[in-house]
Image (spheres, helix red, strand yellow):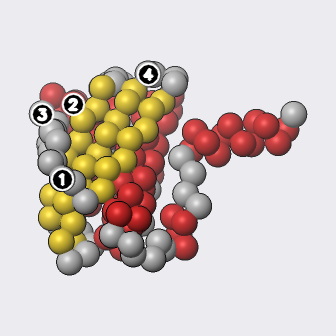
């Protein structure tokens, strides 16, 4: 089997699909490799992620990753959500094929950008961790530039 049962389950029955009106934080990222586009909406109250929804236009792995990532941060504190890595998403999905790992990276990026949006919108001090947050895509572009 190329994909784990969990991946197939979250792909067929994605959790937390949709939009949140007046979201406290929104993050959107794209991935040129698969053409995936992912948007994450956060509803945050007293530092807790009360609700999270996503809209993903993309491959099955991107949809399964978004679904799992939203499940992992729902009900958690903002600080805990900041610790989410794509590795944790992949592990929770019982793995992804190597060439689909970048789809899980998108989920991490979208959530970090949504959190960054939340801190900025509320005039809160942005944690050091995401102050200069760059999506993996931006990091790669910079690394490629530095090599030239
Ligand atoms: Zn993809």
Query: In terms of secondary structure, where does tag 1 sit?
Result: loop
Query: In terms of secondary structure, where does tag 4 sit?
Result: loop
Residue located 15% across and 58% down the image:
51
**Which residue carries the number 3 mark?**
13
x and y, in percent, of residue 24 in the image: 25, 59
Residue located 42% across and 60% down the image:
116
For the residues labelled 1 and 2, say whether their Cβ atoms are less than 8 Å apart.
Answer: no
For the residues labelled 3 and 2, say whether their Cβ atoms are less than 8 Å apart.
Answer: no
Q: Residues within 10 Å of mark 1 (few under 14, many from 20)?
A: few
**Which residue carries the number 1 mark?**
22
Of badges 1 and 3, nearer the viewer stands 1
Per the rendering, the mark at residue 35 is 4
Q: Is mark 4 within 8 Å of ligand 1?
A: yes
The quadrant in which the C terminus is found is: top right
Q: Is residue 46 above or below residue 115?
A: below
* Image-based side of 75 in relation to 3, left or right: left
Q: Residues within 10 Å of mark 4 (few under 14, many from 20)?
A: few
Q: Is mark 3 within 8 Å of ligand 1?
A: no
């Amino acid at each position: 089997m190329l994909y784990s049962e969990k991946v197939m389950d979250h792909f067929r029955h994605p959790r937390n699909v949709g939009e949140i009106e007046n979201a406290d934080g929104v993050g959107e990222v794209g991935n040129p490799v698969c053409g995936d586009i992912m948007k994450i909406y956060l509803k945050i109250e007293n530092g807790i992620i009360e609700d999270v929804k996503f809209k993903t236009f993309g491959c099955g792995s991107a949809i399964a990753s978004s679904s799992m990532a939203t499940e992992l941060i729902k009900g958690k504190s903002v600080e805990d959500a900041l610790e989410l890595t794509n590795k944790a998403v992949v592990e929770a999905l019982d793995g992804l094929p190597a060439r689909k790992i970048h789809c899980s990276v998108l989920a991490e990026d979208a959530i970090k950008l949504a959190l960054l949006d939340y801190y900025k919108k509320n005039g809160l001090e942005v944690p050091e961790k995401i102050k200069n947050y760059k999506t993996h895509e931006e990091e790669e572009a910079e690394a490629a530039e530095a090599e030239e």
